[in-house]
């Protein structure tokens, strides 16, 4: 009887395993969990950024508590991470310009003015990247009490950019009312 119960338990665990497996987007795997400043985060969703017909990057959003509501995710306290893996070569200038365009489209003029110095810091950092090759992984991690940390292929790039408000404004690029890609927004919110 015990062996039947063990067999059933093992079978149930194996059936559940695919649901626990990493999410794959165009060959890029996003793990179910990620840690920022020793805080465990969960993958909220992952998807594809497409511009016209070109696959630009795969992105994943990690948060402390999964949520399908963009406003709640943006305001959620704690560490967060947006992870981007390029699916084509891109210049740092093109990437920075696209980020700034998305930032301005999804934040009020007053917020853009207030955060302009931090936005300039991010742009300066991205310009130092030169050509960012296909397969490069960029992590934009938020550490509470510290700020936004950018990592390129796992290595810290530039100095941190302080402020919860800045990271929330960054998240609106993908989760705001005018996201850079509405299908990507749906995917980051846990949809398909």
Image (spheres, rainbow, N blue to C red):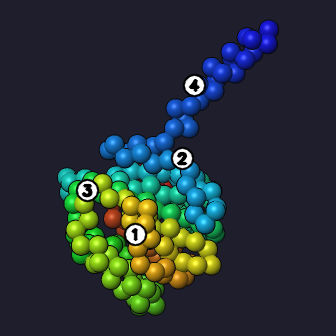
The correct choice, above or below, for 1 with respect to 14 in the image is above
The correct choice, above or below, for 179 with respect to 125 in the image is above
Query: How far, Cα to Cα, is label 2 from label 4?
Result: 17 Å
Query: How far, Cα to Cα, is label 2 from label 3?
Result: 23 Å
- Taking the spot 36% from the left edge, 86% from the top edge, the residue there is 120
- Is label 4 in a helix, a strand or a loop? helix
Which residue is labeled 2 in the image?
32
Pick whichever of labels 4 and 3 is earlier in the sequence: 4
Residue 51 visible, this angle: no
Query: How far, Cα to Cα, is label 4 from label 1?
Result: 37 Å
Pick whichever of labels 1 and 3 is earlier in the sequence: 3
Query: How far, Cα to Cα, is label 4 from label 3?
Result: 34 Å
- Taking the spot 46% from the left edge, 80% from the top edge, the residue there is 159
Which residue is labeled 1 in the image?
173
Query: How far, Cα to Cα, is label 1 from label 2?
Result: 23 Å
Quadrant of residue 138 in the image?
A: bottom left
Callout 2 touching callout 4 (CB < 8 Å): no
Q: How busy is the neighbourhood of tag 2: few (under 14 within 10 Å), some, or many (20 plus)? A: some
Callout 1 touching callout 2 (CB < 8 Å): no
Q: Is residue 187 left or right of residue 143?
A: left
Disc assigned to residue 82? none
Which residue is labeled 4 in the image?
15
Q: Is residue 124 left or right of residue 43?
A: left
Report the mark closest to the observer, 4 or 1.
4
Pick whichever of labels 4 and 1 is earlier in the sequence: 4
- Is label 3 in a helix, a strand or a loop? loop
The correct choice, above or below, for 9 with respect to 163 in the image is above
Which residue is labeled 3 in the image?
134
- Is label 2 in a helix, a strand or a loop? loop
Residue 188 placed where, x, y %? 46, 55
């Amino acid at each position: 009887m015990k062996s039947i119960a063990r067999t059933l338990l093992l079978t149930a665990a194996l059936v559940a395993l695919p649901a626990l497996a990493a999410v794959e987007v165009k060959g890029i795997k996003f793990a179910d969990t990620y840690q920022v400043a020793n805080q465990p985060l969960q993958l909220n969703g992952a998807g594809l950024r497409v511009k016209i017909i070109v696959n630009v990057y795969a992105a994943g959003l990690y948060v402390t508590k999964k949520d399908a509501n963009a406003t709640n995710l943006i305001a959620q306290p704690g560490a967060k991470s947006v992870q981007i893996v390029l699916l084509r070569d891109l210049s740092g200038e093109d990437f920075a310009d696209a980020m700034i365009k998305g930032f301005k489209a999804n934040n009020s003029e007053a917020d853009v003015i207030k955060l302009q110095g931090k936005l300039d810091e991010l742009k300066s950092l991205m310009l130092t990247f030169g050509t960012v090759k296909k397969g490069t992984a960029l992590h934009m991690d938020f550490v509470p009490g510290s700020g936004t940390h950018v990592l390129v292929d796992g290595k810290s790039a530039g100095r941190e950019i302080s402020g919860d408000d800045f990271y929330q404004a960054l998240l609106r690029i993908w989760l705001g009312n005018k996201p850079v890609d509405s299908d990507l927004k749906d995917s980051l919110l846990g949809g398909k």
